[in-house]
Image (cartoon, rainbow, N blue to C red):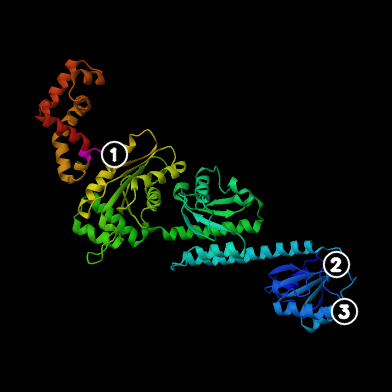
Amino acid sequence: MRLSTLVEMTELGLSPVTGHDELERTIRWVVTTDLLDPGRYLSGGELVLTGLVWRQSPQDSERFVRSLVNAGVSALGAGDTRWGEIPGDLVEACRRHRMPLFHVPQEMSFAEVTEHIVRRLSAARAYDMTAVLDRHRRLVAGATAGAGLDPVLHLLGHDLGMPCWVLTPAGRVVAGSHPLPEGVAPLLARGFLTAKRMPCTLRDVERGDAGRYSVFAVDEQTTPRVADWFLAFRGSFEDWPEERRALAGELVAVVALERARLDDRLSPEGRIAQELVQLVVSDGKPSDILPRLQVTGLTAHPDAAPDAAARGFVAVAAAARGALRPGELRVVVREILSRSCASPVVGVAGEEVIALIPAPESDITAEVREAVRALAPGLGTGGFTVGVSGIASVDGLRGAVEEARYARRMAEGRAEPDAVVGHDELATHVLLLASVPDDIRHMFRVRLLDPLRGYDQEHRADLVRTLEAFLQVSGSWTKCAEILHVHVNTLRYRIQRIQDLTGRDLSRLEDRVDFFLALRLA
């Protein structure tokens, strides 16, 4: 803010006494003092206001003004409540040292002067910061990778006094101007997921007024909150002037661009991750899978020293019914796994998202379950299910993926809408079936079940369901008939038809086992 602006602020009534040719100087703050030598409390660029209490003799004016000049003060404003007018010795000292001097009217308090000027300074800084953010947004939108969000947030937090943070719905801090107090991130994340509208003000009741935060969604119009980022500012946006609200909106735009830049779906790494998942799902050769694993960073080159990935890999399968599209589900899965792996390999396979991570030393199923529980308010009522495999080598990745997918299907049968099933909850036969190649699995199913399905379709029969019920009760005719609500003779006729169509004998244990496995592969 220039000194000439003070003259233009007619509501203050400030008039220049000396330094008429120095009005292009800028001031960055206002300080009131009545010390004779205030230099050690000044850092330069201030407008100093004084009531002249320090002046006991004309010689004091020289000492006072010299102290201001040495501190780099931009201008002096003096009131005349004590002397009736500004003493001539002070005017002369200011003229001699080229210190602009302003007369402050008796009816204008220093508090009013400070309030008006600080408000104007804040607006000017907000305008300048908006320009900085606009330049950064253009930078991020260009080909350059930029320097990330930290420098911009630091400017807002430390220069403009707007502490702010960028967080994910899981409570992970992406960037921030200051350290976030312990326990606040989960509170903000839950508030973001459950708020009826954005922006909103959240309160940490334990911290009183210091615990108020304003929360803004980054991409409210096109992205579900559970797959979005959000901005948190200290204080309530409802108390902000218009300039500060505009600044928050500008920062939201910058963060949206940075978030889009970090989305790896269209990057070479993201495409390789998708290729890798497709290879594993389609039972690709280890010789094709290993090079892609090395590119993704999940495993070291064979000649390199062993790392964490040497322990093997874990597969995760997830699906959602409801508003989440596959690409958004992929973002959610990456966030869920971010605690266990900095860069998980994530790809889409039909309606499922498949992820691969190096086997962690911690309990990955428990970590996934905790993350899903935290995100539950934003997952909707459609249901979100996750399956986690055991540890597998490169050669066993296909089996690990099948194990995770089967565990996820088991989760669909759970009572809770957002369920996670780990490999330790699967039966032994599931682990065995997960390692069987696709062509053998398909042939096994076709040979045993296709004759029954074809008959059911043509005759509107119920042979497949009858077979499932019969095996479920371990071949008990009475219990099976009760489950199906049919006469035992009807049940005997159906079982005989199953045996005739398949050439198997359901009184033999090995044939029952084959049917059981075929149904599990279906």
Picture coordinates of residue 361, whole percent (x, y): 32, 52
Question: Badge 1 is on which residue?
Answer: 425
Picture coordinates of residue 192, whole percent (x, y): 52, 47
Q: What is the distance, in whole Å, between disc 3 and disc 2 at their CAs?
A: 17 Å
Picture coordinates of residue 461, whole percent (x, y): 21, 24
Helix, strand, or loop for circle 3? helix
Asked if residue 26 can be seen in this view, the reply is no
Is 305 placed left or right of 79 in the picture?
Answer: left
**Chain-order first, disc 3 or disc 1:** 3
Density class for disc 1 (Cα within 10 Å; few <14, some 14-19, many ≥20) is few
The single residue placed furthest to the left in the displayed view is 503
The single residue placed furthest to the right in the displayed view is 84
Is 248 placed left or right of 439 in the picture?
Answer: right
Q: What is the distance, in whole Å, between disc 2 and disc 1 at their CAs?
A: 82 Å
The answer to whether the residue labelled 2 contacts the one labelled 1, judged by CB atoms less than 8 Å apart, is: no
- Mark 1 is on which residue type? Glu
Magenta includes 426? Answer: yes
Is 146 placed left or right of 411 in the picture?
Answer: right
Magenta residues span 424-430
- Mark 2 is on which residue type? Pro
Q: What is the distance, in whole Å, between disc 3 and disc 1 at their CAs?
A: 91 Å
Density class for disc 2 (Cα within 10 Å; few <14, some 14-19, many ≥20) is some
Picture coordinates of residue 243, whole percent (x, y): 64, 59
Question: Badge 2 is on which residue?
Answer: 105
Q: Where's the N terminus, which quadrant?
A: bottom right
Question: Badge 3 is on which residue?
Answer: 88
Helix, strand, or loop for circle 2? loop
> 119 or 70, which is in the foreground?
70
**Chain-order first, disc 3 or disc 2:** 3
Q: Height in image: 55 above or below 437?
A: below
